[in-house]
Image (cartoon, rainbow, N blue to C red):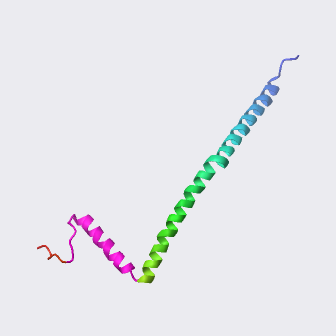
Amino acid sequence: MASPTPSDLAWLLIGCALLSSLVTLLVVGLAVKFWLGPKLERHIDSRFEAGADRLTERFVAVLTGKSRDLIRDRARDLARLVGGRRARDDGEPPLE
């Protein structure tokens, strides 16, 4: 058998590199299709469901007129958080 020429070695090297890339792409593609894809799809579905539930709650609150009360309560909670004051019942006199 004759010894390989430099051009034969170059073609062999290119062929091995292409084969290696093909195997890597195949493994990554299978991992995405059967493992990462379904996991990502379940995560996105759960986020969409949670967002739809929150949107439904807000819509019902607007229709029933509770949105004003919710906004006022959230504003009070935020003011207490920022101001560091304790919660006050409506029956207590204001602090002076």
Residue 39 in the magenta stretch? The answer is no
Q: Residue at x 81, y 27 (%)?
A: 7
Q: Is residue 46 above or below residue 21?
A: below
User: Which residue is situated farthest in the left direction here?
Assistant: 96
Residue occupying image coordinates x 53% and y 65%: 49
Question: Residue 64 at x, y = what percent?
Answer: 42, 83
Residue that protrudes farthest toward the right in the picture: 1
User: Which contiguous range is marked in magenta?
Assistant: 65-90
In which quarter of the view is residue 65 placed?
Answer: bottom left
Which residue is nearer to you in this view: 77 or 53? 53
In the rendered view, does 85 fall on the left or right side of 44?
left
Residue 58 sits in quarter:
bottom left
* Residue at the extreme front: 91
- Was residue 87 drawn as part of the magenta stretch in this picture? yes
Quarter holding the C terminus is: bottom left
Task: Please name the predominant secondary structure of the magenta segment in the image.
Answer: helix
Residue at left 75%, top 36%? 18
Query: Is 65 left, or right, of 43 in this rendering?
Result: left
Q: Is residue 32 above or below residue 78?
A: above
| Residue 48 image point, x, y percent | 54, 64
Residue 29, x across and y down, in percent: 68, 45
Q: Give the camera-side residue of 81 and 86.
A: 86
Image quadrant for the N terminus? top right
Above or below 47: residue 33: above
- Image x and y of residue 38, in percent: 62, 52
Q: Residue 67 vs residue 51: left or right?
A: left
